Amino acid sequence: MIETGDISALTTSQLSKLSTDQLVALTTAQVRSLTTGQVASLTSDQLNKIATNDLQALSSSQIRALTTNQISKLATAQAAALATANLAALTTAQLVTLSTDAIKALGSDQVKGLTSSALNALTSAQLIAIETADLALMSTDQISKLSSAQISKLSTDQLVALTTAQVRSLTTGQVASLTSDQLNKIATDDLQALSSAQVRALTSNQISNLATAQVAAMETADIAELSSLQVTQLSTDAIKALTTDQIKALNSAQLNALTSAQVASLTTSQIGALPF
């Protein structure tokens, strides 16, 4: 039997010539003994034959030695088997080469272990590939560190999967980056959880496309925080959906900003609730 010391003594040229059967026959200790140069010399076919338990045994320095081409060819089972520490050890250049199937195969612990820099490096395709259940388990700090461009690329299913705490953790820049379709999918209880600063960050286009149920569910304190411009962007159906408590929360500047069409849409009960 070849000793571990003998394996590490092989040249990178010799190692790259080992058959897949020979590579599969290596013990975990032998795989662990490979130098970073030897690891980088493995062909994609060779690397794909390494057992998942052997891949898990690789040190962080060995993982970082893998080329982007090697990373891109990892089997989904291998990606799923990477230890959280090893996944965290991947460089930005390595991470972006993981296939979407590999990203989809990651477990909850692996996703939760991704650093802010790693998350920011993910492409739109990779981000969308994260399972909704895994996304919902990400920390609020991880969510808040996603770029506005990344947030705007989340699928509606992923956005719906966000917890109230995660929605609450969105920065004002992230909130403003949400598309109308995304915002329309946010549950009313999550919308109610938005802070005053987040509500003020909503763009005119976002406000104009809010569903009536969403507007009716907004807290009176948040209604009071809407700017005059935001108020003018509410659809007549949204105005009609306001509760009497929400109407009472409107200040004079907001009331004066109402358009003729918005005023005409007020119900008699809403008119009776006007604070004047």
Image: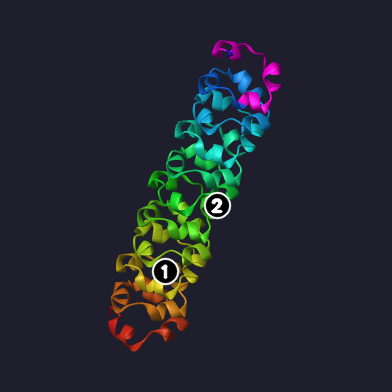
Determine the residue positioned at 42% across, 85% down.
265
**Residue 123 visible (yes or no):** no
Determine the residue positioned at 53% across, 55% down.
152
Secondary structure of residue under mark 1: helix
Question: In the rendered image, which quarter contains the N terminus?
Answer: top right
Q: In x, y percent, where is residue 151?
A: 51, 53
As shown in the figure, which amino acid type bears the numbered disc 2?
Answer: Ile
Q: In x, y percent, where is residue 123?
A: 59, 45
Q: Identify residue for label 2.
A: 128
Q: Nearer the viewer, residue 112 or 242?
A: 112
Q: In x, y percent, where is residue 30?
A: 55, 19
Mark number for residue 190? Answer: none
Secondary structure of residue under mark 2: helix
Q: Identify residue for label 1.
A: 228
Q: Residues within 10 Å of mark 1 (few under 14, many from 20)?
A: some
| Span colored in magenta | 3-23
Q: Give the residue at the far front of this rendering.
A: 1
Q: In x, y percent, where is residue 18?
A: 68, 22
Whether residue 9 is in magenta: the answer is yes
Whether residue 71 is in magenta: the answer is no
